[in-house]
Amino acid sequence: MLQRIQTVYLFIAFVAAGVLPFVFPLWVTAAGEEYFFMKNLAFIALFGLSTTLSIISIVSFKKRKSQFVMGRLNIILNLILLGLFIIRLLNLSGETNKDLIVSEKGIGMILPIISIVFLSLANKAIKKDEDLVKSVDRLR
């Protein structure tokens, strides 16, 4: 059902992966330009897959096992995305040079962490529902 808590968690993960990357830049370049995820094909693909998996998980609320598997896959995609961000973060300089900011990390870098947290909470709630259904089936 759509009113369960895992749907709320999956919706928050959807917002973190599908809406907020358009709002928050990943970093600011040395020239002062904001760098959004749309400038890199790998970021587009991973954010798009994460968003799609979140939507499919929300819609497939009757299939708890497949919902759980899609949540795990979505966590793996976000971990890959986070790894790409960390690699890029290590290559970005963040020093200042006589009151001139060379580059600046953006809040968009932590969006995969937010998604991972809420996907983990959703998987925990899905597992709890599955265990409840199994315990009721044993009583029949």
Image (spheres, rainbow, N blue to C red):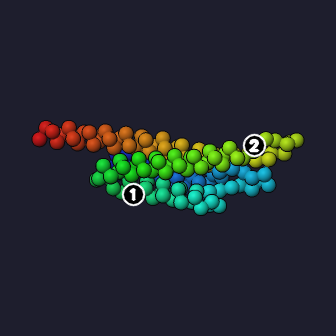
The amino acid type found where label 2 is placed reads Gly
Residue labelled with disc 1? 56
Residue labelled with disc 2? 94
Q: Residue at x 53, y 56 (%)?
A: 47
Left or right of 4 in this view: 138 = left
Left or right of 117 in this view: 28 = right
User: In x, y percent, where is residue 56?
Assistant: 39, 57
Left or right of 21 in this view: 99 = right
State the image quarter where residue 23 is shown: bottom right
Q: Residue at x 78, y 51 (%)?
A: 30
Q: Is residue 60 visible?
A: yes
Q: Residue at x 88, y 41 (%)?
A: 98
Q: Residue at x 30, y 49 (%)?
A: 65
User: In x, y percent, where is residue 1?
Assistant: 30, 51
State the image quarter where residue 137 is shown: top left
> Callout 1 environment at 10 Å: few (<14), some (14 to 19), or many (20+)?
some
Q: Which mark is residue 68?
A: none
Q: CA distance from mark 2 to mark 1?
A: 38 Å
The amino acid type found where label 1 is placed reads Ile
| Nearest the eye: 58 or 102 | 102
The mark nearer the N terminus, 2 or 1, is: 1
Q: Single out the residue that lies furthest toward the left.
A: 140
Count the labels in the image. 2
User: In x, y percent, where is residue 102?
Assistant: 80, 47
Q: Is residue 15 visible?
A: no
User: In x, y percent, where is residue 24?
Assistant: 63, 51
Q: Single out the residue that lies furthest toward the right.
A: 98
- Above or below residue 78? Residue 55 is below
